[in-house]
Amino acid sequence: MTSRQRMQAILAGEAPDRVAIFEHFWPETLRQTWIPQGFPEGRSPDAVFDYDLRNLGWSLDTTPLRGTSEVLEEDDTHRLTRDGRGATLRYWKHKSGTPEHVAFDCTTPEIWAAKYREPLLGLDLERIDTQNLPERLRAGREGDKFLVYGNLFVFELLRGILGDLVMLQSFLLEPAWVHDFCRVYTDFYKRHYDWIFAAIGKPDGMFIYEDLGFTNGPFCSPATYREVIQPYHTELVDFFHSYDLPVILHSCGDVRQLFGQILETGWDCLQPMEAKAGNDCRAFADQITAGGRRIGFMGNIDVTVLNTNDPAKIRVEVEGKVRGMVQRRAGYCFHSDHSVPPDVDYASYQLAVDVMRECGDY
């Protein structure tokens, strides 16, 4: 199989010829750790490890007040900004990580309606990278990799515009506002992706990032998710399916309680299945082999094992997950359970990939 065919099989819930491979990295990993340890400078992990999937990048700017970001404070270690979502966030200047959530402007339905809603109602071609996206798609088509456009969707946008506290309270206290927010953004996505697919072209699939879980479970109950979020997830997935595009769901945290609804919604692959939040790809695969709708899986290689840099522990982790998925005939793409951090040695990641290739044939 080519890389494209391999990923197509996995996203159809089928067993490919072998386990596929893809990865996300923290920015510091290559620069601070791997290049000093011998990673070939000037090359990308995509090329060195021959990844099967290529993410062509964020394809649509979803910021309500586009171009209005400003720096409020700055010192040697931090930068405080207010972005076009009305979010005031404090970032580290010299390392990656989730910023501190300091304040949010859009905290009521009235503020949403008066300031943030209207800019999202029309087709705005300035939101689309018409300069670079066509060339990235053209260049990607020269190879055999599975190409995806990436973006956030309504759960992440609610978090980014309302903040976690107001979002979660509003699920119960202001559901009409949440439905209006999701309706506006779902129409926004469909309107702009219709244009992108017609004017620039289609990838092979979509990669949608929605962090539905935290360490001990989903951010909201399955019943609340079904009421205020799942209808819009289903509509977006159906929209992409109408273009024959499979859709990968990225969700951090513990999503075990939502897995049945993930199947119902129609997502074609679940990623990254954080092991440190209790997820196990083999347990998910058991649910589909027991008669559930078949989807693909990507991830679940525990970075808290990889960053021990202990070859024996790494081998046990990778062999157990990879052999388990192959034995279940579950479509699987090798990937960490989030992103590879800078405390994972280059040799440790090389070993993990080597072990995957040793036992990854179906």
Image (cartoon, helix red, strand yellow):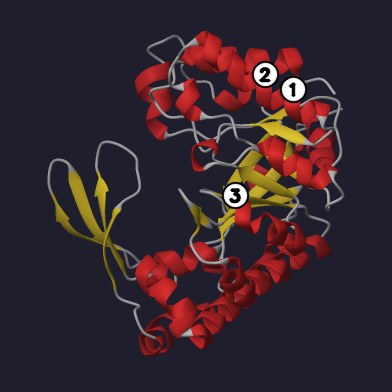
Quadrant housing residue 102 = bottom left
In the rendered view, would you say 102 is above or below 300? below
Image position of 57 (left or right of 15): left
Residue 323: mark in rendering: 1
Mark 2, other Cα within 10 Å: few <14 / some 14–19 / many ≥20: some
Residue ID at (64%, 77%)? 187
Looking at the rendering, in which quadrant would you find the C terminus? top right
Task: Name the residue nearer the viewer: 156 or 204.
Answer: 156
Q: Residue 89 location, x and y as percent?
A: 27, 58
User: Circle 2 sits on which residue?
Assistant: 319
Q: Which residue is mark 3?
A: 250
Which of 204 and 161 lies nearest the eye of the viewer? 161
Contact between marks 2 and 1 (CB within 8 A): the answer is: yes
Q: Amino acid at mark 3?
A: His
Please identify the quarter of the rendering in which residue 44 is found.
top right
3 or 1: tag closer to the N-terminus:
3
Tell me if residue 228 comes above or below residue 327 in the rendering: below
